[in-house]
Structures are given as C-alpha cells and as structure tokens.
Image (cartoon, helix red, strand yellow):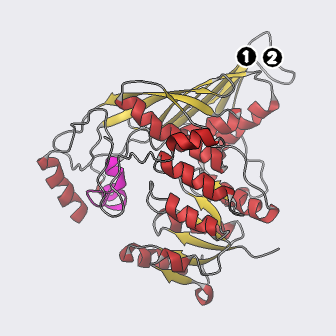
C-alpha cells in the first residue's frame, strides 16, 4: 500500500487531527503554523506521543515552503474563515485537501475555490465529523433503508454553551480581541447541525431563512465578543422539496446535539443527552421486524471500533480521517456532505443565513456553483463579519443588533482573564 504523506496546517486543531491521520494509516511528515508558541507546543506534543517520526518530520512558518515538502495531502486547520487561499494553493499543486469547517469565508471565495478545484487533480474532503457520531450513523442507516418513506422534514441542533467563568476557553480559543470567534455570526458555525441531516436525507439546501435569539452578556463577565445572539433558528427549503430546521452554534439550555428525520411513514431521532435513538412508525405502516416504537442504543458494527472510541467528537475524528485516506487510495471524491459542492453549499447557508438574520428573516436563495450564471452573480461578493489577515476591517455586522459591542468593563475583565 502506497504511503500517504500528510502535512498539518494549523498547530491547534490541526495537531489534534494529526493523531487520527496517523491512526488511519497516513504518515505525518510536516507541520506549519505562523504562531511560534503554538507551533512549538504542537511539535513537542506530536513528538512526545510518537505521532511523528523525528527523522522524517519538518516544521515551517511559511506555507509556500511547507507545501513544497513532498506532501500528498494537507490537513487545512488554520483560522475558521481563512481556509480558501491555502486550499487553492494545494489545488494548484495537485495536493489533496482535508479541510476544517467551514470551507470558505465569503461567497467570492466559494466561487474561486470551485473554479480552482475544477482545474485540479486534487481530492477535497470537508473534515466534518458530526455525521459520523454513532447515533447519526444509525439515523443515516435507517434513512438509507427506506422504511421512513419520502423525507419531508429534518432537524439539527448543535448546542454548546460555555461557562463565563471558563477562562481556559478564552485563553485557548479566543485569545486576542480580533480573534474570529469574537466576530462569529451565529449562523456561521453551521456544519455540525446541517451536515448530519444532509448526510441522512441526501437533500441539499436551496433557500435559507434565519431569525436571531438575542441575549446580551452579563455586564460583569469577561467579554470581547461583538455579537450577542445566543442562537439563530434557521430553516431551508431543499432541492427535494423537504424542509430543514436547525441552529448553527447555539447557546441555550443544556449542552448537547439533537437530530431528527421525519418521513411519510415514520421518524428517527437521537434522544437528547444520551447515545440512544428512538425509531417510530405510524401504526399502519410498521415494517416487518420492527415495533411501532423502537428505543435502543446503536452499535458501531465496525472492525476498528477501538480506534473509533478513542478518537475525538464521538469517534467522528477517526472515521472522517479514514474516509479521506480511502478516497485518496481509491482515487475518488467523497460523497455528500463531504464533497466540495456540499461544503460550499453549507458555507453559503452560513454566509447568507447571517444576511437573512440581519434583515429579520428575509429569504436568500442558495446558489448552485455548478452553474456559471450563479458564479457570476457572487464572484465579487466579499462581505464578511471577520477581520482580515492583514488588518482589514469587517464589512458586515456580526450581530442582529449591529450597534452591540462589549463594554469597557467587559473588555477590561477579558484582558485580565486571558493573562491569568
């Protein structure tokens, strides 16, 4: 079997993903990050845990030199909204790409990435792990079996509140004032909610509507966040006529993930706060071998269960790494929702969802970048709520109340918290 040489771009999340690349059979041969302290810490960890071979491992702070290292593939895990330029450089060299979410930060970048991909021999896979959680795999298995009938409706919810006293989270994930998380529109972190229901149903969003849930932070907590929406309730009309309802990254109630798919004959959902699923049928359409109500904990049924359960995000991190390497070995692109068009579609839902939210629910059509007419419409649209890598100011509000900003007291407490 040919050795697959993988480089890691991004010493934070990227270093975590290096473990799964190695476990799935790749050889991690290089790491690149512009931040010296984080780069050195990641290298120390990877060497200590024997993820890399010190005799065949290089470290870079220059991406252009990094991708000349003889790489078959690159894990792109730099800042959330800054993947596209680096992905395109990989495409230009025929290097395969395993990209963290989202795929593109602006609509114009989505067009650029698709155009570059079409000229390339690269395989592209979105590194979205939530569809591979055990209960989501079971939801897809049942959907694929056809017993639910025609899919009409699905829900996805990724809920991740964080304690305001968790200073370690601030220091690790929000460590300076212009960090992308401080300007993250609440529709943007959407793939954990949307990808699992796309995977289960095979449907692709075609129109999005979003409404905000606004809840400003307490005055006496450390805060540099410029958006105070706790969630966006989003709906899409899909290419098969079905409807999705989902949140992106929400902060309400209790942490957890919830997914539900409803068809004409039945429905399946995971039970909030547990690993169980509930599969139900109308009492006149119960398939042979099933009950009207089926309540159970699904099994992995995978020969590599030991590697799966020791991986992050409910086993999803290992499974998507394995899928990526299989695509490389077999010379094929991944299927929905991991392929490049699905990735750009979800990014479009995120980006245009924010515009819908800012306009209190005005619907936006999601372009199909297979079509040149749709590419032309969006090829110059670079509106963004984020600061640019060279200090460019945001060109779009990130909050449903555009005038919102952290107070001087909150900023003072934030600066004190990240220094502790």
Residue denoted by label 2: 286
Label 1 crowd bin: few (<14), some (14–19), many (20+), radius 10 Å: some
Relative to 63, say whether 147 is above or below.
above
Q: Quadrant of the N terminus?
A: bottom right
Is 169 magenta? The answer is yes
Task: Confirm whether residue 252 shows in the render.
Answer: no
Q: Position of residue 254 (x, y in %)?
A: 42, 35
> Upstream in the sequence, badge 1 or badge 2?
1
Give the residue at x 75% y 23%.
148
Task: Confirm whether residue 279 shows in the render.
Answer: yes
Give the residue at x 78% y 57%.
332
Q: Secondary structure at mark 1?
A: loop
Q: How many marks?
A: 2
Q: Position of residue 158 (x, y in %)?
A: 49, 38
Magenta range? 168-183
Q: Quadrant of the C terminus?
A: bottom left
Q: Which residue is at the far top? A: 284
Along the horizontal axis of the image, is 380 left or right of 94? Answer: left
Label for residue 264? 1
Instruction: Specify the principal SS of the magenta part.
Output: helix
């Amino acid at each position: 079997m040919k050795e697959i040489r993988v480089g890691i771009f991004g010493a934070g999340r990227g270093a975590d993903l290096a473990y799964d690349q190695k476990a799935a059979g790749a050889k991690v041969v290089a790491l690149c990050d512009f931040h010296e302290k984080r780069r050195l810490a990641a290298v120390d960890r990877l060497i200590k845990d024997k993820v890399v071979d010190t005799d065949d491992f290089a470290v870079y702070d220059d991406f252009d030199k990094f991708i000349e290292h003889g790489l078959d593939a690159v894990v792109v895990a730099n800042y959330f909204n800054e993947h596209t330029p680096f992905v395109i450089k990989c495409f230009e060299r025929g290097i395969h790409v395993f990209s963290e979410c989202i795929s593109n930060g602006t609509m114009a970048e989505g067009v650029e990435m698709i155009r570059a991909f079409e000229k390339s021999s690269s395989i592209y896979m979105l590194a979205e792990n939530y569809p591979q959680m055990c209960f989501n795999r079971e939801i897809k298995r049942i959907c694929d079996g056809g017993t639910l009938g025609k899919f009409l409706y699905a829900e996805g919810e990724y809920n991740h509140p964080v304690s305001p006293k968790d200073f370690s989270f601030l220091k690790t994930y929000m460590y300076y004032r212009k960090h992308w998380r401080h300007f993250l529109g609440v529709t943007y972190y959407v793939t954990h909610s949307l990808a699992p229901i796309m995977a289960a149903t095979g449907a692709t969003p075609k129109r999005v509507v979003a409404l905000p849930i606004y809840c400003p932070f307490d005055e006496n907590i450390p805060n540099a966040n410029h958006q105070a929406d706790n969630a966006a309730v989003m709906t899409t009309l899909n290419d098969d006529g079905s409807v999705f309802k989902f949140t992106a990254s929400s902060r309400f109630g209790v942490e957890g993930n919830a997914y539900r798919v409803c068809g004409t004959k039945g429905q399946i959902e995971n039970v909030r706060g547990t690993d169980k699923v509930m599969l139900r049928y109308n009492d006149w359409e119960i398939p042979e071998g099933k009950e009207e109500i089926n309540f159970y904990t699904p099994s992995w049924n995978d020969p590599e269960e030991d590697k799966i359960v020791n991986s992050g995000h409910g086993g999803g991190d290992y499974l998507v790494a394995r899928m990526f390497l299989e695509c490389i070995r077999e010379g094929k692109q991944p299927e929905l929702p991991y392929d490049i068009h699905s990735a750009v579609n979800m990014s479009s839902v995120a980006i245009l969802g924010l515009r819908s939210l800012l306009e209190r629910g005005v619907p936006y059509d999601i372009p199909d970048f297979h079509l040149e007419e749709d590419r032309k419409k969006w090829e110059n649209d670079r509106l963004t709520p984020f600061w640019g890598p060279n200090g460019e100011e945001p060109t779009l509000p990130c909050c449903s109340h555009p005038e919102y900003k952290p107070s001087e007291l909150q900023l003072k407490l934030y600066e004190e918290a990240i220094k502790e």
